[in-house]
Amino acid sequence: MRLSEANLAAVQAAIAESKVDGWLLYDFRGLNPIAAELVGVEGLATRRIFAFIPRAGTPVGIAHAIEPGPWRHWPAAWPRTIYSGWRALEAALADVVKGKTVAMEYAPGDGVPYVDRVPAGVIEMVRAAGATVVTSADLVSRCYAGWSGDQLAAHERAAEQIAAIAKAAIQRAGDAARAGTPIMEHVLKAWILERFDAEGLMTDHGPTVAVGAHAADPHYEPDAARALPIASGNVLLIDLFAKDKSAGIWADQTWIGAMGTPAERVVTVWNAVRDARDAAIALLSRELAAGRPVTGGAADNAARQVITERGFGPYFTHRTGHSIDARDLHGSGPNLDDMETRDDRALLPGVAFSVEPGVYLTGDFGIRSEVNAIVKPGALHVTPKAPQRELIVVG
């Protein structure tokens, strides 16, 4: 969201709810995409910029004399202090923040690196100017990461499209395996990309098409040099993510197929992963319905407990889910994570994320199940409409 006169009141309401005096935005050479988006920076700010959004009143920018370009979207009615040297910059900053508590893209102890965008030296500068600095994590969730109603609708369309493509790809692989002419991983990947294009979808990399031991590598991407045939007796993992080419929001899913009757161990792992996914969703749904604050870290722990109790805890080596914000597949909003990071951000209405526990048995096979979810007032909305419940057995 670009800050404007039209949405200033909503942003200031969020600032007031956060109980701070204002939100201090900082960017330099693209270090902080959150600030750059809100200010409306186009290209790189090659000199330091600050923008202070007070809880009430008019925002103030601090801009370098030789670089007006980054401010072309800053409303004309909002003042900017112009500086050339560092003394003038620090004086201007003190004029704006002295005696105030300000939120910045800062995470104590780097606990949430997705909002830890401001260098330690800048935090020191702001404190030296007389301000108390706190994290802007909840403001980022409210004003940057959240989806609008139109964006949710765009996501839902993409979610149903990629779910259909994933199931068709698994069936295609199964038919070929049964016929004795198995498809190579990279060939099925190319077919999925062709289907994306035909459906008006786009992606920036992937998808993952991984069979057998390759499925135990969470970030495997097939190419002709290392691809394996998707033959009978194997587990097939497809992780695909795409958005509408025009104005879409990412949808991200993982589906699992079995080429022929799966081994008992495969079924056991699948059940553990699916139940872990559903445990995270159930916890979030219950807490949101009760009106209680809940964090992504709590959902991560709920999923991890299931997999640990089933005996696969050491093989669940990543967080349960990542933020999907209005711009990025791996966004700046809350993650379902108390493993890789200490994500204690509240899951506020409008934020969205993946739910994707996995078990990876190196050299054998891997299982992951992934859906997406968006927080609504008092509820959790999950996509696609029909998540995978059982292994898709083909071939």
Image: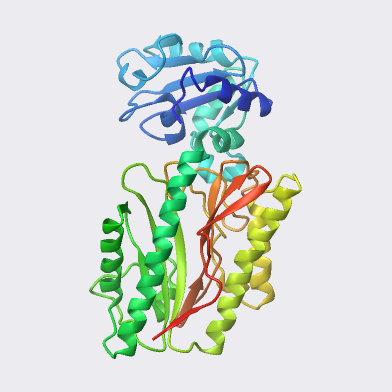
Can you give x and y, in whole percent of width and height, for residue 264 in the image? 56, 89
> Split into 4 quadrants, where in the image is the C terminus?
bottom left
Question: Looking at the image, which residue sits at the far left?
Answer: 224
Considering only vertical position in the picture, is 249 above or below 393? above
Horizontal side, residue 213 vs residue 121: left or right: left
Q: Nearer the viewer, residue 166 or 52?
A: 166
How is the rendered protein coloured? Answer: rainbow
Q: Nearer the viewer, residue 202 or 367?
A: 202
**Which residue is pictured at 56% across the width and 83% down the height?**
267
**Where is residue 182, by image quadrant?**
bottom left
Q: Is residue 236 visible?
A: yes
Can you give x and y, in whole percent of width and height, for residue 299 in the image? 65, 57
Considering only vertical position in the picture, is 273 above or below 301? below
Can you give x and y, in whole percent of width and height, for residue 90 in the image? 49, 15
Q: Is residue 132 visible?
A: no
Can you give x and y, in whole percent of width and height, for residue 47 in the image? 35, 23
**Which residue is pictured at 45% across the width and 28% down the height?**
38
Considering only vertical position in the picture, is 186 above or below 377? below
Horizontal side, residue 352 vs residue 275: left or right: left
**Which residue is pictured at 33% across the width and 77% down the height?**
172
For the image, the number of numbered tags is 0
**Which residue is pictured at 72% across the width and 54% down the height?**
286
Q: Nearer the viewer, residue 375 or 137?
A: 375
